[in-house]
Amino acid sequence: MSEDVKEELKKLREEMAGLKDRLKDMAGEGHGRRRGMYIDFGNTQDYVDDVMRGVANGVHGELERSIFIGPGGCRMWKGHRHEEEEGGIDFGQAAKAMSALGQEHRLKILDALMSGGRYINELQEELKEITTSTLSSHLDVLEEVGLVVQEKVRGRYLITMPGRTAYQMARKVSRFLEAGGEE
Amino acid sequence: MMHDHYELEKAVLRSDDAFMLYRTEKASVGIEKNTFAVPIKVEEEKVGYVFVGQGKLVVDAIVETEEGAFGKSIERALSEPFLMLGNTEQTSQHFRPASCDDLKRAAVDERTLLDRAQKLLDQYASKSTVSGHADLCSHSGWIFAFSNGENALDHLVSKGSELVYNAKGMSFVSKGNKSILHSSGRVVLSRHGKPIVVNTPHLPHPPHSCC
């Protein structure tokens, strides 16, 4: 494991410890001030601790045999994971994703989302050539195959990990073809 | 065990309108008009409610990273009783004492409704193993517990921008620009948009509150 990876993991462990501390603060005694209400946080605190501990331990133990994606997109494959990755392809699922990609407007929507989440009115502003109803319909298609996800509380649309991969693949194909197949 | 600290008022209230009990950028809990509520007390102070009626929970359990988003938005109809601990001041303004006619219209009797509320409160309180109290200031801290139909509770805990949602098969923690999602055999951690994705086929899911 590279030093960068170790450093990143260390930071994340610290962040998780910080989160736990904050949750303990939320539940802790000694804030006994003013008019606040007093609620038993006991079981929930234990429960949150267990959740955090479970995730932390699991991450530590599993990392050696898992995929790691770093900030720069670095990937490390080990053992059985490598074999799994070289295994078969879900043709049905892949075909659905490819089919969703096979539309110019949808590629433009993914392109817009590559720079960050957007509300539908923001997408409409950026993609003026697409009508509102068509835009919604395209977003539904992209969401259905998992290339885009909508936050239901805020309403923003986000490109997913598979969505980014699909977009990058489309971009590569486009460049390759532009270069006459001689990239 | 902290069970004795919680008590239900022997009064049933009814909501005048549909409204949001809780809403942040990541999650919301709303109830419909004519939802019944039973106040929860700790030492004569009202600290929450058990709701019986129709509601909706939405949690955007999505980790946003430079490599793309991971996770999904969870929308769940709340037709089983659920519990809220937190600021009751605003919530209480939407409730009036339920009349016999209200209960008749909903085809429930007061005794049954109170029993259901008590059962949920007992289920929540029975998991308590650590003594101690927390001071939740007005508008800052919330605990929701939802029956998931499998004799267990899902939890939503929030204070300010910090949120923990733990349900069967998934856990989600969010704090500002940092978030963790454990779901579908994978843990995704994001810190300021920088992701780490760990496949965890051998990792048991974090403990779930079974009763």
Image: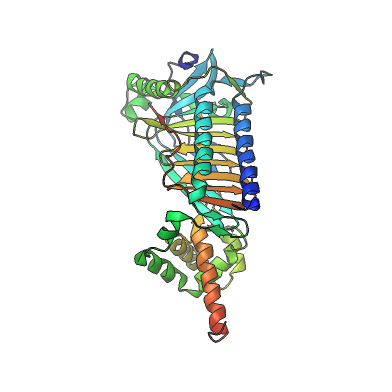
Q: In x, y percent, where is residue B197?
A: 53, 51
Q: Nearer the viewer, residue B92 or B117?
A: B117
Q: Where residue A80 appears, x then y in whole percent?
A: 42, 55
* Left or right position of B39 against A125: left
Pinpoint residue B40: horizontal percent, then vertical percent. Answer: 48, 20
| In the rendered image, the vertical position of residue B85 relative to residue A130, given as above or below | above
How many tags in the picture? 0
Q: Is residue A132 left or right of residue A141?
A: right
Q: Nearer the viewer, residue A162 or B89?
A: A162
Say if residue A152 shows up in the picture.
Answer: no
Left or right relative to A80: residue A67:
right
> Which residue is found at the position 41% from the left and 38% from the top?
B168
Indicate the position of residue B207 as horizontal and vertical percent values. 44, 33
**Residue A28 found in image quarter:** top right
Residue B168 appears in the picture as rendered: yes
Residue at 60% x, 57% y is B66
Look at 54% across and 63% down and name the residue there.
A164
Q: Is residue A158 above or below residue B179?
A: below
Quadrant in which the C terminus of chain A appears: bottom right
Along the line of sight, the residue nearer the viewer: A59 or B20: A59
**On the rendered structure, is A145 left or right of A55?**
left
